[in-house]
Image: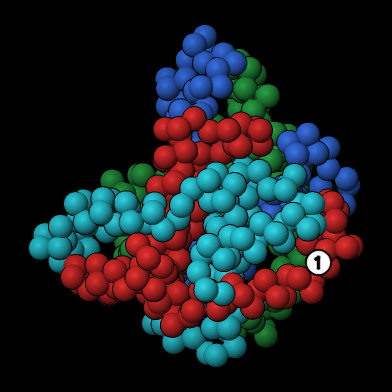
Chain colours: A red, B cyan, C green, D blue
Amino acid sequence: MRDLTELRERLRAFADERDWEQFHSPKNLSMALIAEAAEVVEHFQWLTEQQSLALPADKREQVAQELADVLLYLVRLADRLDIDLLDAAEKKIVLNAQKYPADRARSNARKYTEI
Amino acid sequence: MRDLTELRERLRAFADERDWEQFHSPKNLSMALIAEAAEVVEHFQWLTEQQSLALPADKREQVAQELADVLLYLVRLADRLDIDLLDAAEKKIVLNAQKYPADRARSNARKYTEI
Amino acid sequence: MRDLTELRERLRAFADERDWEQFHSPKNLSMALIAEAAEVVEHFQWLTEQQSLALPADKREQVAQELADVLLYLVRLADRLDIDLLDAAEKKIVLNAQKYPADRARSNARKYTEI
Amino acid sequence: MRDLTELRERLRAFADERDWEQFHSPKNLSMALIAEAAEVVEHFQWLTEQQSLALPADKREQVAQELADVLLYLVRLADRLDIDLLDAAEKKIVLNAQKYPADRARSNARKYTEI
């Protein structure tokens, strides 16, 4: 897989071959997206933060699969809405840099707890 | 933004400049990921499927920002776990192709409702 | 089960007998809560709204179990924070009545899409 | 608010007075439910477990409102599916007691990480 563009095209073909476009409304895909994000959360819910940083290999492999599922639905949803993900990410990073200037945000937990 | 690799590097620098690594445990990032996925869901919760396919321009712009937020946390989380997202996506598509052969899955709503 | 108070007491005893208090921080319980909410979402993600109103008996039974799981973690989380759920619900309904006066909100989809 | 039955009746009247039944399909309500659960998660995502156990009063008040929102949508969703929440909770607790016998589960983190 070279990039997000190839991924988008393969997912589009995958859905098309199965006649699944009819199920892939943005509304439905947003539900699938959050259901997959929840699978990620489930892996971490009873772990300490420290444990979450040092996953055993098999668990890490499972988490990788869940992250892939999130990406798949995210790319599919963006495609259905004709949104360019990298372009949107670029814009968001610029906004975030204005919102949290590095010199003031440095090590500032309040920035985190109050956003 | 060229690709996910550049995005990963920029997010890493962004967190580093703000001394935010301490907050970015995979556990915490999984929570931020699902919170952003929920912002996407919120845009669609009272819309019909049909309406979700024909968003007004300003609403579509807002959804693009939420999708960007999901991508940002997804990339950051993968980075903290040293997971290659495109590689994981590739593997998952292969698995899905085996699980849902195109000829049998064609237009099959049951495949959807019973997985 | 008579009421939420009995449910709270039984869940407290259940955790206590298993020495699970240590895992039941509000942070962790909020993750478990959303993971269970996602199980509910999963049942509906590929259904039309109409289909979601007319579930087959076995599916309805499964959804009932997921709703129970959400309630269990919600009650447990409220208990750990010493929050009275019915009291909080009462307050929220009063707030909502002020926010959405019946005469103006009547049949107003915009109230929904723009909140 | 005396109990869940009164809450259900008040929410039913609230929706009826505003002609909102049309938006309250179980599918839509499951989305609203998880969006509210995510508001809870947001409060805790950058806190340590310890901090989540010792919220300042104003933050605790905000979390109480979010928990109320989760309860409101949970009760509304159960009502639309004609599910008795306390009855479902009772059944689930019995199942959980069989699944995690107190003597074997005692202080067992593995029971948590491997379910």
Instruction: Name the residue located 75 percent from the left edge and 39 percent from the top edge.
Output: D48
Most distant residue in the bottom direction = B57
Q: Residue at x 33, y 56 (%)?
A: B90
**Residue placed farthest to the left in the image?**
B103
In this picture, residue B22 sits left or right of residue D59: left
Q: How many marks?
A: 1
Q: Residue at x 78, y 34 (%)?
A: D50
Q: Is residue D65 above or below residue C94?
A: above
Q: Secondary structure at mark 1?
A: loop
Q: Nearer the viewer, residue D81 or D40?
A: D40
Left or right: residue A14 compared with residue C79: left
Q: Is residue B27 visible?
A: yes
Residue at the disc numbered 1: A100
Residue C67 appears in the figure: no
- Between B37 and D85, the one lying in front of the other is B37
Q: Which quarter of the figure has residue C71?
A: top right
Which quarter of the picture shows residue C65?
top left
Q: Quadrant of the N terminus of chain B?
A: bottom right
